Image (cartoon, coloured by chain):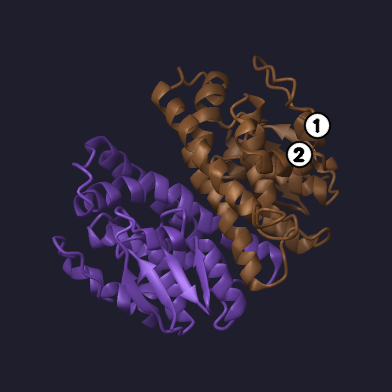
Chain colours: A brown, B purple
Amino acid sequence: MTRLYHFTLSPFCRKVRLVLAEKRIEVELVEERYWTPSKDFLCRNPAGKVPVLRINGLTLSDSQAICEYIEETVPTPELMPQGAKSRAEVRRLCAWFDDKFHHEVTAKLVYERVNKRVTRGGYPDGQAVMAGARQIKFHLDYMTWLLDRRRWLAGDRMTLADFAAAAHLSCLDYISDVDWNRCAVVKDWYAKVKSRPAFRSILADQIPGFIQPPHYANLDF
Amino acid sequence: MTRLYHFTLSPFCRKVRLVLAEKRIEVELVEERYWTPSKDFLCRNPAGKVPVLRINGLTLSDSQAICEYIEETVPTPELMPQGAKSRAEVRRLCAWFDDKFHHEVTAKLVYERVNKRVTRGGYPDGQAVMAGARQIKFHLDYMTWLLDRRRWLAGDRMTLADFAAAAHLSCLDYISDVDWNRCAVVKDWYAKVKSRPAFRSILADQIPGFIQPPHYANLDF
């Protein structure tokens, strides 16, 4: 059985869950309290991070390495395009969201407001939250710029880049931190991703102490 | 002509330079003052980061996306192994160094001590420097653990993971922040990587105001 050690509101885990579901790989989800890592957990991933995937007798970590592994072993449906140029663009955008967007937005909003409370890591840093709220606007504008020129973020077909971006936005949407009125084209794109069967398990997520807004799981939000 | 926009002591740029040199792709290096980005630079990469590579009429950014592109278009000599399992291990280790090691060590030592002075970004944060000096020991121990079991970091052959790691260590070595006496097996591995022709241009680097230690460019250090 394929097993994913994850944390519900981790965008990296959500990216892997979306890829697994899109490829129709059944997976057992195991919630990992990564902030109080057990010895077993550190043996699985000495980096002390989620996601960790048990698949085909292997233990894999790092969300991008995991997604590329799944793509290489289960190529259908295709989430990486053919052609080195297009693949470079998908990887650039995955890094954009998992590095830049994560650092400037997700860490400043989701981690400050949710993870700190869940992990008893102290109070949210108000300045960080304000910076995150400011910076998400720049990112939504950049996504608008891309989506004005392309059907999906990296080109004419849905790719891993769309799942990377949607994973972050879904975490932010859970705490109502995306101003969908700012960006009609991004909203339309998100509605398309959200309506995929792969998104179902993510829309059913519950974080104790945080009630998601009514539009969170609504496909016609 | 292939052109790399880079910053001398950026481990991400050094990783790309090593891959280009190993593949014998001639490149023109253009030093980029990324901390005062020009409009042209932001057009090349809206993320405002180096490296940016002009190659085959394309403009590529994100060091991992660039390296995977080079690997896919110039497969010899091979820096990614065959087999999804081995490739996942190479990518996990690239992420280990470019994410975890970078965050815990390189940013705390090189960026605090060098980049802040070069970019006139203020004084080094003493606590960050101390944390970096503490954390590099854990990483050197982990590399020792790997290299006690494998000839190279990701297995029996040299891969992109070795270049990712060596790029970070070479930046730290420039400012004498690697205690080579702690880790004989890592020192032996680094001597092997450093003696490759691909490393020559990096060993000739000069940062105004920072004189490298005598052992920096010495292959028999």
Q: Position of residue A14 (x, y in %)?
A: 69, 40
Secondary structure beneath dot 2 equals helix
Local SS, label 1:
loop
Q: Is residue A134 above or below residue A86?
A: above
Where is the N terminus of chain A found, in terms of image quarters?
Answer: top right
**Marks 1 and 2 on same chain:** yes
| Amino acid identity at mark 2 | Ala
Please name whichever residue, A154 or B27, is drawn nearer the observer in this view of the structure: A154
Q: Looking at the image, which residue is at 69% across and 17% down?
A: A211
Observer-nearest of A90 and A36: A90
Q: Estimate the x, y position of residue B3 in percent, counting from the top left.
A: 41, 76
Letter of the chain that mark 1 sits on in the rendering? A
Which amino acid lies under the numbered mark 1 shown in the image of this protein? Asp
Q: Say if residue B185 shows up in the picture.
A: no
Q: Is residue A7 left or right of residue A96?
A: right
Q: For the residues labelled 1 and 2, say whether their Cβ atoms are less than 8 Å apart.
A: yes
Is residue A164 visible in this depiction of the protein?
yes
Chain holding disc 2: A
Please give the count of numbered marks on the rendered protein: 2
> Residue at left 76%, top 43%?
A193
Please state the horizontal and vertical placement of residue B114, each as a whole percent of the image: 23, 53
Towards the viewer: A145 or B107: A145
For disc 1, the neighbor class at 10 Å (few under 14, some 14 to 19, many from 20) is: few
Q: Residue at x 45, y 77 (%)?
A: B20
Asked if A170 appears above or below B196 in the picture, the reply is above
Image quarter of residue A78? bottom right
- In the picture, measured across the screen, residue B204 lies left or right of residue B153, that is left
Cα–Cα span, label 1 and label 2? 7 Å
Q: Can you tell which mark lies on residue A220? A: 1
- Tell me if residue A178 comes above or below residue B27 in the rendering: above
Which of the pair A152/A172 is nearer the observer?
A: A152
Q: Which residue in the structure is indicated by mark 2?
A: A191
